[in-house]
Amino acid sequence: MKRVGLELGVLVFAFGLASAAASAQTVSAAAVRDVVASYIKASLPPSLETSINFEDLKKSYPVGYKQCDLVVASANSVTLKGLVTFLVKARPSGREEGYTQVIPVTVRIRTFQKVLVASQTISPHSEIERDDINTVRAETTDLQNPVSSLSELKGKWSTRWIQGGKVLTFDMFTDEPIVKRGQEITIIFRTKNITVRDQGSALQDGKLGDVIRVANEYRDNLRARIVGRGEVVLVN
């Protein structure tokens, strides 16, 4: 999911087209709502469906100019989900300086998307197959990094028990080991002038670059670094 970094007091996105022509030096609630809604739409990925509810809009807001542009200056949320407060600033039309009234706007943002749900209990250290999951539309407002496609789990396996009916999230998975415990492997012994290959077995799971315990015919507690699928190099 695309994430948008927002720092308070830092201008991150401006809508010059949101010029608020109003009398008596005010801007309407509609102008404020439109600029915030456009900001939210531009900041979230297109795959997300959103429901936006403005919690505290007034009928109008006083500003220092009859003609002004509205700028979303900051938000107090990185993910733009749940209850989010935006700071909207007004500036003279066509100018980069001269901000006047700061308008705080609180918005409740709900998100919905297609996600993967476990169709049955999934055990740790399992690769996910098509029969293990269903695809459903669900609210993802309170979910961090839900999985939306089986292809996103290619080369990964589960790290825990996942109960049937649970939405899959990326924190439930890690890269699948390229060497697995009990697997027959090639152990490479290297010196400055000699390279010797021997057959052995892995005593631990591991990913590329991991140092794991391995055994051969003569010793059962060797340490070796994984350098490829089914290949390790002995380390001191």
Image (cartoon, rainbow, N blue to C red):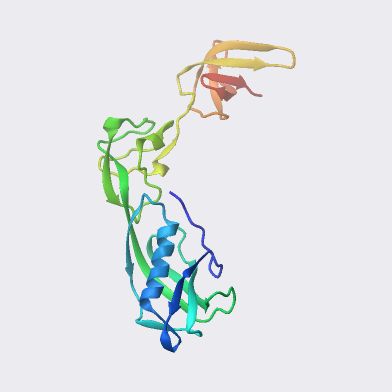
Q: Position of residue 150 (x, y in %)?
A: 35, 35
- Closer to us: 236 or 155: 155
- Closer to us: 65 or 170: 65
Residue plotted at (34% across, 56% down)? 141
Residue 99's place in the image compared with 157, above or below, is below
Residue plotted at (42% across, 43% down)? 171
Residue 91's place in the image compared with 189, above or below, is below
Q: Position of residue 42 (x, y in %)?
A: 43, 58
- Closer to us: 143 or 46: 46
Kindly tell me whether residue 121 is visible in this rendering: yes
Q: Position of residue 167 (x, y in %)?
A: 31, 45
The residue at the far bottom in this view is 24
Looking at the image, residue 216 sits to the left or right of residue 46; the answer is: right
Q: Quadrant of the C terminus?
A: top right
Residue 214's place in the image compared with 24, above or below, is above
Q: Position of residue 168 (x, y in %)?
A: 34, 42
Residue plotted at (30% across, 31% down)? 130
Looking at the image, residue 98 sits to the left or right of residue 90; the answer is: right
Image label count = 0
Looking at the image, residue 14 sits to the left or right of residue 130; the answer is: right
